[in-house]
Amino acid sequence: MQIPREGDYVAIQSYKHDGQLHRTWRETMVLKTSENEIIGCNDNTLVTESDGRRWVTREPAIVYFHKHYWFNIIAMIRDTGVSYYCNLATPFVLDKEAIKYIDYDLDVKVFPDGEKRLLDVDEYAAHSKMWNYPPEIDKILHYNVDVLIDWIDKGKGPFSQAYIDLWMKRYNELSHH
């Protein structure tokens, strides 16, 4: 697929290990693409769940995908501060339909005050058993949780306020043309 340009809109599709579609975001504005990463923004974006439920995102969110890391990051910009939702997932692939990845259940949530929580450990254990996740997946995911925690602790990339300010400014420029 042709790489999307800044200002283009792309869909995001999250799958589960068994190949089932998990969640879809209809329109994410692309803010930057490079060889290894895509940065975008969701704002009032329609989200469809695997069970058909639909909802719309309530606040702007900067999304970060990388080709070499087994996580993606959603920085939700709220009046109370930035909250992060980090999905442990395969590196993204891009095709003519969407940005795609396999979601591996584990999530790290970071609150505006810096508190971190590892979520959905039970769901991960249940799916791991049900779908026979290979041991390598478990190793890769646990390593990437450590990388993510390191990024959070050091304010690296999406976890820095300067990063959020830069990409929100770019989103505002592109969306008001």
Image (spheres, rainbow, N blue to C red):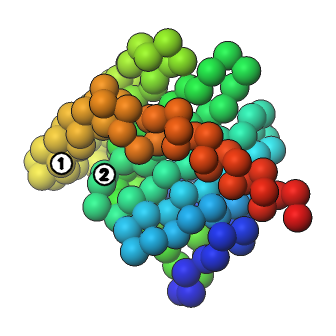
Quarter of the figure with residue 62: top right
Instruction: Depth check: give the residue in front, 111 or 89.
Output: 111
Query: Mark 1 near mark 2, Cβ–Cβ under 8 Å?
Result: yes
Q: Is residue 94 left or right of residue 9?
A: left
Placement of the N terminus among the 4 image quadrants: bottom right
Q: Which mark is residue 140?
A: 1
Q: In the rendered view, would you say 113 is above or below 176?
A: above
Where on the picture, by quarter, is residue 149? top left
At label 2, counting other C-alpha atoms closer than 10 Å, the crowd grade (few under 14, some 14-19, many 20 or more) is many
Task: Look at the image and tell me whether residue 64 can be seen.
Answer: yes
Does label 1 or label 2 sit earlier along the sequence?
2
Secondary structure under the numbered disc 2 in the rendered image: loop
Vertical comparison of 4 with 51: above or below: below
Q: Quadrant of the C terminus?
A: bottom right
Which numbered disc covers residue 70? 2
Q: Residue at x 72, y 68 (%)?
A: 7
Q: Position of residue 101 (x, y in %)?
A: 44, 59
